[in-house]
Image (cartoon, rainbow, N blue to C red):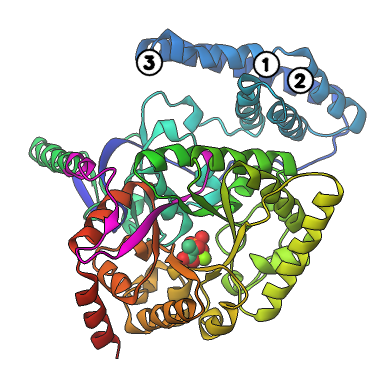
């Protein structure tokens, strides 16, 4: 038995065999070849190997998960015989003299895109299969023959030195019970994703990470930040008990479903959900969300291999709006940069990406990307109650430029006879000290503020939110950060606009009394935290919280 200590970054307890994820599944290089016949032979052999692998996996899966679930491996095998698909690959090799691995890779992307754009939902779902089976052939061609997650038939614990959000979002969640990482912090986006998926995670295992072995059985304790490898019977039993307690807590919280987050003296707060994918809207509603306080639209870009089109985006926003049935949905425009990178943006390496070319700076520079997103958002606005929010604002000029662009997009839509809701609210993330200091002026320009405490803490305290070495300094509850929030709330209310918090601290039980005392109107948290936050708000007296906050922040 081996216990490794880290930090708990997503609550809960889970177990499974460790799956060590190595970062070697990069896109293959486009290499020109002299002998295209030899390349076609390599392709043929790789496809035969892939079919053998799939047949073997099918047999294994029939035993472990039943015939119906195993069928996917048969489908993949059949897809590998599709003449259009094979001819496309062969043509690239023959005509362009390109290596087999790149030809398969690019064909997978092209065919995936064709499938994604189809009307039929079943066919759209095949896009992931085409990418998956192309990935299998590419891995064989590149000699990456070790077990891949796609071959796993039981839930595993993903172990990685670092997990990038773009990677996390592309993993098949149905095969994952928990995450453990060598690096990472509670406010890195991979941890945020784990929380929104409701999967336990432990990060910052440091050198202890190297003691983990692929295939070893482990318990992940996302409450106390521990990873226990090959636990003995006594510890396993203790964890069984701990897990039951967490389950009981969940059941208890169900009893407040349907009630409002009103303090004992009558102050009402909205408790909304942070989501990163349209599929998370419905579970958020089941957890009693009053709305979506933050839809991180950049995840649509991260899970895609090219810029998502206006149609694809519009379908995603429409889905969320419809599912939320009239409740407000705040979509944040593309907040790319720092740990959220999509290769097809071709953003050059930067020494300080958190302070670099990111978020609204990209949008106002590469306006064609921004216009596509604004058009998709406005077109979707007729399907529900949409609010649009802009990330990383530091100046009045940015807000003026955004408003000018929106007016232009609206004019175009009108000219094209495309309808949209005129009264869409516009808001900004207050997540930089500059936005706080300009809050009185910015509040006159927008309909709402949402305080991003993840970045605001990073920038106020000058502590990189991704750096586990100094994570002890990263403190949402620091008086410096709390004063920033208090000032922002006061400026918002003086100017008659609402203000929420959508950073991870909104779910911090210790800090909620301060937020209630300051008069924050909305807390937006991971769906799994909604009921707990609601219960906390209901237990408080707002006036007492106000007096305490005023005294402590004076
Ligand atoms: C924040 O900064 O608090 C926030 C909500 O945005 P993100 O975590 O995506 O940077
Ligand atoms: Mg942020």
Q: Which quadrant of the figure contains the N terminus?
A: top left
Front residue of 228 and 456:
456
Q: Can I make out residue 70 in this image?
A: yes
Say which quarter of the image contains residue 362.
Answer: bottom right
Position of 546 relative to 185 (above/below): below
Mark 1, Cα crowd under 10 Å, few <14 / some 14-19 / many 20+, is: some
Which dot, 1 or 3, sits closer to the camera? 3
Are discs 1 and 3 less than 8 Å apart at CB? no
Left or right of 156: which side holds 98? right
Looking at the rendered structure, the secondary structure element under dot 1 is loop
Q: Residue 413: x and y, percent?
A: 80, 50
Q: Residue 92: x and y, percent?
A: 85, 29
Q: Which residue is mark 2?
A: 85
Front residue of 376 and 140:
376
Q: Which residues are magenta?
A: 249-278
Q: Is mark 1 within 8 Å of ligand 1?
A: no
Q: Residue 51: x and y, percent?
A: 60, 14
Tell me how far mark 2 sits from mark 1, CA to CA.
8 Å
Disc sitting over residue 65 in the figure: 3
């Amino acid at each position: 038995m081996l216990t490794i200590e880290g930090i708990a970054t997503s609550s809960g307890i889970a177990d499974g065999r460790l799956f060590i994820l190595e970062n070697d599944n990069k896109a293959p290089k486009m290499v020109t070849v002299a002998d295209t016949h030899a390349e076609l032979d390599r392709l043929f052999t790789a496809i035969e190997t892939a079919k053998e692998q799939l047949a073997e996996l099918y047999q294994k899966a029939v035993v472990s998960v039943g015939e119906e679930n195993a069928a996917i491996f048969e489908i993949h095998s059949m897809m590998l015989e599709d003449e259009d698909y094979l001819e496309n690959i062969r043509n690239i090799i023959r005509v362009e003299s390109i290596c087999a691995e790149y030809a398969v890779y690019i064909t997978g992307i092209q065919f995936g895109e064709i499938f994604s754009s189809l009307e039929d939902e079943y066919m759209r779902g095949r896009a992931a299969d085409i990418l998956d089976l192309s990935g299998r052939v590419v891995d064989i061609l590149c000699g990456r023959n070790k077990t891949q997650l796609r071959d796993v038939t039981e839930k595993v614990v993903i172990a990685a030195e670092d997990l990038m959000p773009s990677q996390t979002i592309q993993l098949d969640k149905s095969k994952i019970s928990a995450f453990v990482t060598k690096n990472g912090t509670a406010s890195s986006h991979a941890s945020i994703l784990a929380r929104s998926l409701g999967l336990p995670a432990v990060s910052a295992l440091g050198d202890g990470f190297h003691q983990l072995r692929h295939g070893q059985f482990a318990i992940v304790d996302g409450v106390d930040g521990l990873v226990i490898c090959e636990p003995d019977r006594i510890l396993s039993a203790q964890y069984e008990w701990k897990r039951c307690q967490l389950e009981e807590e969940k059941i208890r919280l169900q009893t407040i479903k349907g009630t409002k987050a009103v303090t004992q003296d009558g102050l009402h707060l909205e408790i909304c959900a942070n989501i990163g994918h349209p599929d998370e809207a419905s579970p958020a509603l089941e957890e009693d969300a009053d709305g979506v306080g933050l839809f991180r639209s950049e995840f649509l870009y991260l899970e895609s291999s090219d810029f998502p089109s206006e149609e694809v985006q519009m379908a995603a926003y429409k889905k969320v709006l419809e599912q939320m049935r009239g409740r407000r949905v705040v979509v944040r425009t593309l907040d790319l940069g720092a740990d959220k990178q999509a290769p097809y943006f071709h953003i050059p390496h930067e020494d300080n990406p958190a302070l670099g070319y990111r978020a609204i700076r990209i949008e106002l520079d590469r306006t064609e990307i921004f216009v596509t997103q604004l058009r998709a958002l406005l077109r979707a606005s007729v399907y529900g109650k949409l609010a649009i929010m802009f990330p990383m604002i530091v100046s009045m000029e940015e807000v003026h430029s955004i408003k000018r662009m929106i007016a232009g997009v609206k004019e175009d839509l009108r000219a094209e006879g495309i309808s949209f809701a005129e009264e869409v609210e516009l808001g900004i993330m207050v997540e930089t000290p500059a936005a706080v200091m300009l809050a009185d002026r910015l509040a006159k320009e927008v309909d709402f503020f949402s305080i991003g405490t993840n970045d605001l803490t990073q920038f106020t305290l000058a502590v990189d939110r991704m750096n586990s070495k100094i994570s002890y300094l990263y403190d949402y509850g620091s008086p410096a950060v709390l004063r920033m929030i208090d000032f922002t709330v006061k400026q918002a209310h003086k100017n008659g606009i609402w203000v929420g918090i959508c950073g991870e601290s909104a779910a911090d039980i210790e800090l909620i009394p301060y937020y209630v005392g300051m008069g924050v109107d909305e807390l937006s948290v991971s769906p799994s935290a909604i009921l707990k936050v609601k219960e906390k708000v209901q237990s408080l007296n707002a006036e007492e919280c106000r007096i305490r906050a005023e005294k402590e922040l004076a």
